[in-house]
Amino acid sequence: MLLLFDIDGTLLMRAASEHAQAMHETAGELWGVDTRGVKVPTGGRTDPEIIRALLRGAGVEDSRIDERIGEMVPALVAHYERLKPDDLSGFLAPGAVEALDELSADGERHLSLVTGNVQEIGRRKLELAGIGHHFAEGQGGFACDSAHRPDLPPIARERAAAWNGGEPWPRESTVVIGDTTRDIACARADGAMVVCVPTGPQSADELAGADTVIESLHELPDALRRLG
């Protein structure tokens, strides 16, 4: 089974303030606008989507955004590296460490990522939280691969060919683990299963479209056993 974990709101809770500040500073550097007063929903969205929404909210037209969007990732990473905290272990979601330890020890489960973070920032957050070692380099789907979240599970399955004899990992044994309806939508678009935990912006009722909704990651190993 291929397990595709979201990061913010799923593995980590309220650990994105420096990431948000890096976005504002990137907007200022590349587009010369102050986006700090612009409020946009971020749950389940990719970094490029969030940057674009902030810029639109500040009055920047798409044509002007597109002129420099290709420079966004390196600028965003540089700002995050400067702003990042020394330690994010205090922001781990309940049950995250225990679930990851148990799942990593199971030779039939392969842990990977599908996240709206660009890869360098997502992996840095996990490293700072002390759980980065669970996620192999060269695996996963990230916002730097595509700004469109439904594109990410197929990318992650393609990369997981390294665990499947050179063939993309089958969608029918792939599970997205997230905290928003966007996680559900991206899983469904690829024909994957999905487990949700209401530790992000949405309630258990709002996440009812998932195959399983669990109260915390403590329940994840058992939920996955029930899915097969």
Image (cartoon, helix red, strand yellow):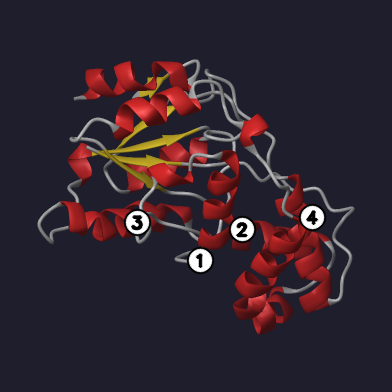
- Residue 106 in picture, x, y percent from top left: 23, 30
Residue 9 placement: quadrant: top right
Q: Pointers 3 and 4 in contact (CB under 8 A)?
A: no
Left or right? Give the position of 218 relative to 61.
left
Q: Is mark 1 on a helix, strand or loop?
A: loop
Q: Do the residues labelled 1 and 2 touch (CB within 8 Å)?
A: yes
- Label whose residue precedes the other's in the sequence (1 or 2): 2
Q: In this view, does 162 lie to the left or right of 70?
A: left
Q: Where is residue 22 in the image (x, y as percent from the top left)?
A: 75, 60
Q: Which residue carries the number 2 mark?
A: 47
* Amino acid type, callout 2: Asp
**Residue 140 visible in image:** yes
User: What's the residue type where badge 1 is placed?
Assistant: Cys
The crowding category of the residue bearing disc 4, from other C-alpha atoms within 10 Å (few below 14, some 14 to 19, many at least 20), is some
Q: What element carries label 4?
A: helix
* Distance (Cα) linking label 2 and label 3: 19 Å
Q: Where does the image place residue 210, in percent across and percent down from the top left?
A: 39, 27
The alpha-carbon separation of the residues under discs 2 and 4 comes to 12 Å
31 vs 185, left or right, is right
Q: Which amino acid does label 4 sit on?
A: Gln
* Rendered residue at 60%/79% (across/down): 70
Which SS class for mark 3? loop
Labels 2 and 4: the sequence-earlier one: 4
Q: Distance between the residues labelled 1 and 3?
A: 13 Å
Q: In terms of sequence position, does the residue under pointer 3 or pointer 4 come before the other? A: 4
Task: Tell me residue 85's x, y (percent).
Answer: 73, 48
Q: Mark 3 points at which residue?
A: 139
The three-letter amino acid code for the residue at tag 3 is Gln
